[in-house]
Amino acid sequence: MKAESMARRYKLLLATCMVLAGSVVFASSDVTDQEVDRYLTQYRAVPDHIKQLVEQLKWSGIGDPRLFDPIASDLQQLVEKGDLDAAEVEQGAWLVHALAYSGQERYRPLLERIENAYRKKMEHKDKKLHRNVSTALTSLENHQKWNLVIGRGTEQASSVDELRRLRVKNMLSAEEPVLVRVGANLMIHDFLRDREVTDLARDRLLELHVEAEASRDHADAVAWLCKALGATRNEAYAPALKKVQRGATVRTVERWSAIGLRQVGG
């Protein structure tokens, strides 16, 4: 009991320090902590091959400084080294995007310093790093909002599969159409036989299809929902796809609602 009490106090102290350091504090559980540990082990094992790790982190909602502080430290050391070759610039670009996907404000000063340092450099490789940092600063602002949505309630997950499922449901339920699109994409890869997830996708399609003209992001979200429901090959979704097809006024929605309807046998 004493050890558990000490652990709770340590977590509280760590959370307080994170707030003071400018971090967003995310609720955690044994499952999410183990996931962070796994990513950290992966990063430390092959730090020069970070692309796959960053792609996995992009839509994970993870913002734990335990993972991202070592990445920030490596990025700072890389930039301070100077005179980077092409491979090091590529490595730096992926490290930059990793920090952006954390959604943590604490990494903005480092990214801004790098952007300013490379602003006047004229070599092609330097321009590439500067361009990636500029993009990452925009991504950082987006992920500050998106990670809170993606990570909502994930501390309740009792397994890795449940954790992934919760994230997809959070994205499908989101108000932000970009997250809905990503959720539909992830559904295609992993949850086509999960009726609760696919029914949620259908419900969101019926809600969102009338907003397809609002923006390209809205149209893309609706089109991906059509694509995801079509991929289920479940005729139960024919009525929803037929309704969307009949009212579609955006070309991409017309196309994918028609394709989805054929796939489900409608």
Image (cartoon, rainbow, N blue to C red):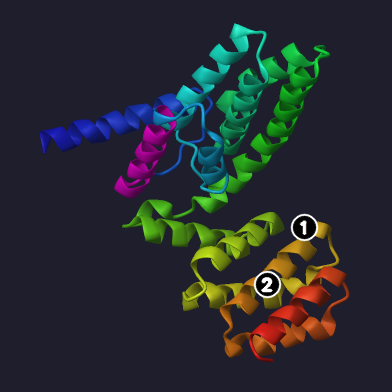
Residue segment shown in magenta: 28-44
Callout in the foreground (1, 2): 2
Question: Which type of secondary structure does the marked residue at label 2 adopt?
Answer: helix
| Residue 223, quarter of the rendered image | bottom right
| Residue 246, quarter of the rendered image | bottom right
SS assignment for the magenta stretch, majority: helix
Q: Position of residue 97 (x, y in %)?
A: 62, 33
Q: Where is residue 261 in the image (x, y as percent from the top left)?
A: 70, 85
Q: For the point 82% across and 12% down, which residue is it? A: 120
| Label 1 CA crowd tier, 10 Å (few <14, some 14–19, many 20+) | some
Q: Is residue 173 visible?
A: no
Q: Nearer the viewer, residue 70 or 214?
A: 70
Question: Which type of secondary structure does the marked residue at label 1 adopt?
Answer: helix
- In reply to whether residue 121 is colored magenta, the answer given is no
User: Which quadrant would the C terminus be assigned to in this image?
Assistant: bottom right
- 1 displayed left or right of 14: left
Identity, as a three-letter code, of the amino acid under mark 1: Asp
Q: Is residue 92 above or below residue 113?
A: below
- 120 displayed left or right of 38: right
What residue did someone put label 2 on?
A: 227
What residue did someone put label 1 on?
A: 217
Q: For the point 63% across and 23% down, which residue is it? A: 87
- 180 displayed left or right of 56: right
- In reply to whether residue 37 is colored magenta, the answer given is yes
Q: For the point 47% across and 24% down, which residue is it? A: 69
